[in-house]
Structure formats: C-alpha cells, structure tokens
Amino acid sequence: MTLLTCNDAVEPFPGAEASTEELVRYYFNMSFNYHDICGFLLFVHHIVVSRTTVKRILRRLKARRYGIESPLEEIVLKIIEQHAMGHIDLGYKSMWKHLITQCGIKVRQETVRIALKAIDPRGVELRSRNLLRRRRYISQGPSFIFHVDGYDKLKPFGIAIHGAIDGFSRKILWLKAGPSNNNPRIIARYFIDCLKEMNAIPRMVRSDAGSENVIIRDIQVALRSFHHDNMSGENSFTVGRSTANQRIEMVWSFLKRSFTQFWRNIFKDMIDLNLFNNADNLHIQCIRFCFLPVIQMHLDRFRQTWNVHRIRSEPNREVPTGIPNVMFYQPLRYGARDCSCHLACNIAVLDDIADSYTEANPQYGCSREFRDLLELVNGQNLHESDLPASPNDAKVLFIEMVSLLDSM
C-alpha cells in the first residue's frame, strides 16, 4: 500500500521503517486526531494500537496541540508571506491547516481568523459571499490599450464582424460587418481609419494570435517605434487568447443579447423554409448584398447607444465606471489621463500606408464578379439601386434576387 506522506511538510515523513512513536508524532504534527492516527497506523502501516495507547505515546513525547501558540508577530508575518507566495484565497481554516502542516507554526484557528480579517479584509468579504477574487484590470486612462477581436457568430451565414474597444473607457472604437474578419488588410484599414479620426495612436494594442492581426501589429509597432517609453516598439502590441480578452468579450456578451440572436433566428428560419442555402456561394453573395447594409446600420446603432450609456459599477471590481464617451474624452474627471501617443507622421502618410498595406471591404460585401452579374441582370448601375432599410426589406429583396438568379 502507498504510504500517505507529505514530503514538503515541515514535519518530514519518518520513513517506512519508522517506529510507532515516530509515526504517531508525524501524524499528530500533521494535525490528525486520535481516531485518524489509529486508522493510519492500522490501514497504512498495519500497526494495531488503541486511542489510549496513542494518548500515552503523545504524553510521553510531551506533544501538545492546545495551550501553546507561536508569537503573534510570527503568525502575522507568516500569513503575509504565504499571501505573497500565492495562497491569498485560503480561508481561515485552510490557512490554519497550511500554517501548521507546511510552516511549522503553532496557532489556533480563531487566531488565524482574526489575523486574516485584519490583514486581508477584502478577501474575507469575498470568501464570505462565495465570490472569486478577480484579477484587477490595469489601464491608466483612455488609449492606454485597445482591444481588438473578431466575432464569428454570424459567419455560418456569410457575415463576419470585427470590433475594437478602449480598455479604460469601454468605448467601442469600431464595429464593422463584412464578408471576412480574417483578411489582415481589411482589419488594418479599420485601424488606420481609427488613427486618422483620433490623430493619435494608442499606447498598446491587444489581440489574439490570429494571422488577421499581423498588419495591425506591424503598423502599431512601426508607428510606436518613434517613441521612447517602456511600451514603445515591440512592447506596444500584446497577444493572448481570444477568450481572455476580457474587455471586448464583455461587448460580445451584450451584442449576443441585443443583436446576434435576432439575426441568427432570421437566417435559421430562412434555412428551415428552404429560402436560403448557406452552402451555396451564390446565396451567400445575395445575403451579403441584401443584409449587410441593414446589419451595419444595426451595429452602428448598437455602438452609438453603447458609447453614451452609463456602465454600472460592479461589486468587487476596482475599475472606474461611467459613460464611455465621457470617460474617453474627459479622463481627468476619473483621476486618469489621456495615454495616447502623438503620431510621428501626418494624415497623408497614413493614407499612403492605407493604400499600400490595407484595403476596404468590397462594395456591398460582394465579389466583383457578383456585382457585375447583378448589373447585367438589372440592366442598371448598382449605385442607382435602393438598398434595404429594414430586415424585412432585405428578406424580400433576397427572395426576389435568388428567384431571379436561379431562373437564369
């Protein structure tokens, strides 16, 4: 049978050849009671002893658990040390056990409880309410860090979404629908347009490791190489898992409730009614032509509403809250500052960068060949066509368009 040992404990395991007295001392110092000690001796070491014998051995060893306690200062310092080592979320009972078995501290549970309440009152409160101690989000002000990410919930229907949010204010910087959120040239155009609007550059940008972000990374690193702070150059772009990109994941969660489910239901209903075949590229092109203008209008309204709504304060979150636009443009009111860096080039240079390294979404979200086909069928320039203004208008146009193209 495998021996129950704790090799990292202050009281080292005495070994397989240990005497009964040594085993009793070990299990006692590991804070087991008499009944448990007898059980370990019987089932692990095949030694039969009674509770009375265990008590007699402990008296002979002058081993006591009650009535003795390490100095209070030593207890407090050891708790602080253990917090620094990562044991910050232990409750008082777990900390008490940890101090006894791992640190060699003699202490009562009540002493640990009182000490923890004095040392870490916030942690005690969180544990009493069964709440997690969340990592504190650090942002010194607007434009300290931009979070960018793609949103794929409508991709099965040919629509891809990409967005960016300021980490401090939670202001949505862009929210765009198009045929792809994986084309790095298109994603970089969103970024360039944002820089031109701000006439500044964020201190940092965070994204996932996808290849769609490589040109944004190159532009950010290049333009920040002219600065000389500790986050300039390569340090101005950071990569992490998409699911850990907390700020923009929060936006996606709200978008799901007020936007995504509505559109998913529309497209799924069209599939169920055999109106839309999302495996047919021609149908996908028609969906983009008919629905993208309405979807983008919906996204624009979501972004505008979001940027002027008041973000409620969250319990146990040490971050400022308010209206995103106010926080972004008036950071001094929140004890913060504008963290953007000046552009080391003028708008004309940004235009040159955009022309060389980025591209806009294709017109109407459709391929050149599909647009030519529509103009041929309609006998007129697409610019002269009226675009749908509502989901129902888009659906009617889609049905008519598919019917016409299928009949050819």
Image (cartoon, helix red, strand yellow):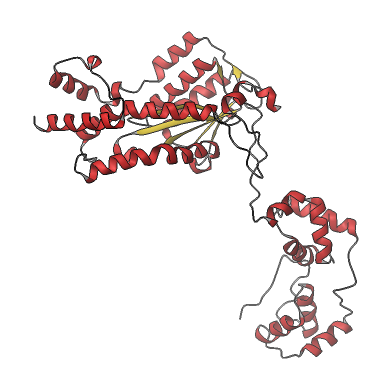
Q: Quadrant of the N terminus?
A: bottom right
* Residue 18, image x, y percentages: 75, 81
Q: Quadrant of the C terminus?
A: top left
Residue at (54% x, 11% y) in the render: 345
* Residue 52, image x, y percentages: 81, 90
Residue at (69% x, 24% y) in the render: 333
* Residue 64, image x, y percentages: 87, 76
The answer to whether 259 appears left or right of 146 in the picture is: left
The answer to whether 240 appears left or right of 406 in the picture is: right
* Vertical position of residue 165 compared to residue 97: above or below: above
The answer to whether 262 appears left or right of 407 in the picture is: right
* Residue 80, image x, y percentages: 80, 52
Residue at (57% x, 13% y) in the render: 344
**Residue 122 shows in this picture:** yes
**Residue 152 shows in this picture:** no
* Vertical position of residue 96 compared to residue 358: above or below: below
Q: In which quadrant of the rendered view does residue 167 lie?
A: top right
Residue 125 versus residue 150: which sits nearer the camera? 125
